[in-house]
């Protein structure tokens, strides 16, 4: 079975073709991506209406490219999958509209995928896929969550941010240092030249005893520190700027590592899956690898280029849902998007989770 996946929830248009054979792990045949980041940089963040219009421009050429690279034709697609939510309503409508229109024209069924489930299952596209059950640390631009994952569609939320996401903490702090949107990758490159102990920044909710996060206060502390430093906090080449970047990254990473290891211990899990854009962060990977090696826990990441938004994870999540029999694709072509959509709504049974404390 061949599944075409379309991602258009935010500022990346992604299309991919995945093939399933029986119960074997689905195989990625081809994928293509267009990032709108450069267009939004002029505004310091994503402009929703511009994002929607650009998805319209990109989605069909990317689909043609994916089919050509896989040596496949439209007629050979069995299921059309698209990101149903969460995300920007207008942007989601483009992917859903195109998937439904193609499906209606081809007489094929469609399947709407949860964007975070795509991130969560993206490590299954790697050469060393995880096995269920595992603890998942989902760290994207809009979400910071710890989940217990017992199988496809069986997700229990253990903790999440009560304000900003880790990605937002990276992006907002980076902006204070004069780095372009999205600041996460730039801040982490800058941090490599700095001293992570140079400035004392808070580790919010580090010892709260639960698995929730909070990053809004950290951003305020970075703002206060940058005001104390003065213009050097935004000056290219200034050692203070690199030190501030390193100190900010160290604070975010320390909290993420601490809460992840607490969750692993509390549920006696020996596997951790890290997904979402912040999962590309080198320091986070190094610290998690060290902590997990110590606790004899295996840690899995998506391939670096599949950490941020892409179509492959959407096609993969659709393939795994179909394979596991938790959902069937249907010939229902209404543009049905869910801009707000908690991931745990996908779970058929609510498994009550035990508090870690
Ligand atoms: O998962 P994603 O592509 O989009 C959402 O679904 O939100 O995540 C984007 C986020 C942005 O906040 C970006 O700054 C962050 O991931 N990010 C990073 C790195 N690469 C991307 N943050 C820290 N270090 C990185 N290397
Ligand atoms: Zn994402």
Image (cartoon, rainbow, N blue to C red):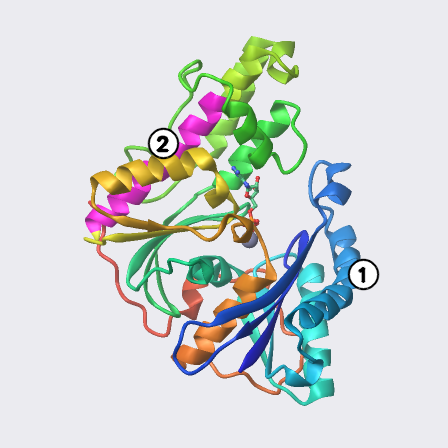
Identify the residue shown where x is 61% and y is 9%: 230
Question: Is residue 326 shown to the viewer in this render?
Answer: no
Residue 193 placement (x, y as % from top left): 51, 19
Q: Are marks 1 and 2 in contact (CB under 8 Å)?
A: no
Residue 220 placement (x, y as % from top left): 52, 25
Q: Earlier in the sequence, mark 1 or mark 2?
A: 1
Q: Quadrant of ligand 1?
A: top right
> Callout 1: 10 Å neighbours few (<14), some, many (20+)?
few
Circle 1 sits in a helix, a strand or a loop, which is it? helix
Tell whether 171 sits left or right of 200. right
**Quarter assignment of residue 154:** bottom left
Tell whether 284 sits left or right of 207. right
Which residue lies under the disc numbered 2? 254
* Magenta-colored span: 246-266
Residue 269 placement (x, y as % from top left): 23, 54
Question: Is residue 189 shown to the viewer in this render?
Answer: yes
Which residue lies under the disc numbered 1? 57
Q: Nearer the viewer, residue 119 or 283?
A: 283
Q: Is residue 66 above or below residue 301?
A: below
Q: Is residue 142 above or below residue 341?
A: above
Q: Nearer the viewer, residue 24 or 262?
A: 24
Q: Quadrant of the C terminus?
A: top left
């Amino acid at each position: 079975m061949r599944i075409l996946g379309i991602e258009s929830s935010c500022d990346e248009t992604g299309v991919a073709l995945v093939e399933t054979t029986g119960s074997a792990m689905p195989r990625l045949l081809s994928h293509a991506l267009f990032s709108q980041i450069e267009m939004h940089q002029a505004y310091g963040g994503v402009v929703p209406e511009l994002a929607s219009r650009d998805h319209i421009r990109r989605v069909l050429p990317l689909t043609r490219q994916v089919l050509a690279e896989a040596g496949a034709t439209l007629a050979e697609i069995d299921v059309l999958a698209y990101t149903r939510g969460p995300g920007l309503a207008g942007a989601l409508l483009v992917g859903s509209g195109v998937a439904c229109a193609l499906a209606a024209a081809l007489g094929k069924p469609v399947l709407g995928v949860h964007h975070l489930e795509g991130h969560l299952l993206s490590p299954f596209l790697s050469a060393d896929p995880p096995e269920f059950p595992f603890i998942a640390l989902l760290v994207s631009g809009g979400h910071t969550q710890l989940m217990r994952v017992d199988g496809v569609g069986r997700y229990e939320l253990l903790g999440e941010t009560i304000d900003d996401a880790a990605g937002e903490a990276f992006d907002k702090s980076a902006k204070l240092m004069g780095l372009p949107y999205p600041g996460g990758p730039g801040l982490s490159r800058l941090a490599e030249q700095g001293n992570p102990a140079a400035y004392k920044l808070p580790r919010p909710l580090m010892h709260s005893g639960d698995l929730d996060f909070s990053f809004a206060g950290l951003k305020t502390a970075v703002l206060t520190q940058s005001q104390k430093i003065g213009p050097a906090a935004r000056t290219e080449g200034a050692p203070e700027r690199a030190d501030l970047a390193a100190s900010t990254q160290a604070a975010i990473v320390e909290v993420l590592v601490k809460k992840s290891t607490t969750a692993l211990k509390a549920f006696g899990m020996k596997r951790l899956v890290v997904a979402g854009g912040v999962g590309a962060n080198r320091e986070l990977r190094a610290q998690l690898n060290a902590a997990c090696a110590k606790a004899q826990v295996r840690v899995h990441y998506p391939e670096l280029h599949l950490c941020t938004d892409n179509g492959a994870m959407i096609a993969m999540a659709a393939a795994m849902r179909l394979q596991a029999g938790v959902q069937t694709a249907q010939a229902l072509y209404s543009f049905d998007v869910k801009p707000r959509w908690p991931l745990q709504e996908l779970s058929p049974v609510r498994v009550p989770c035990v508090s870690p404390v």
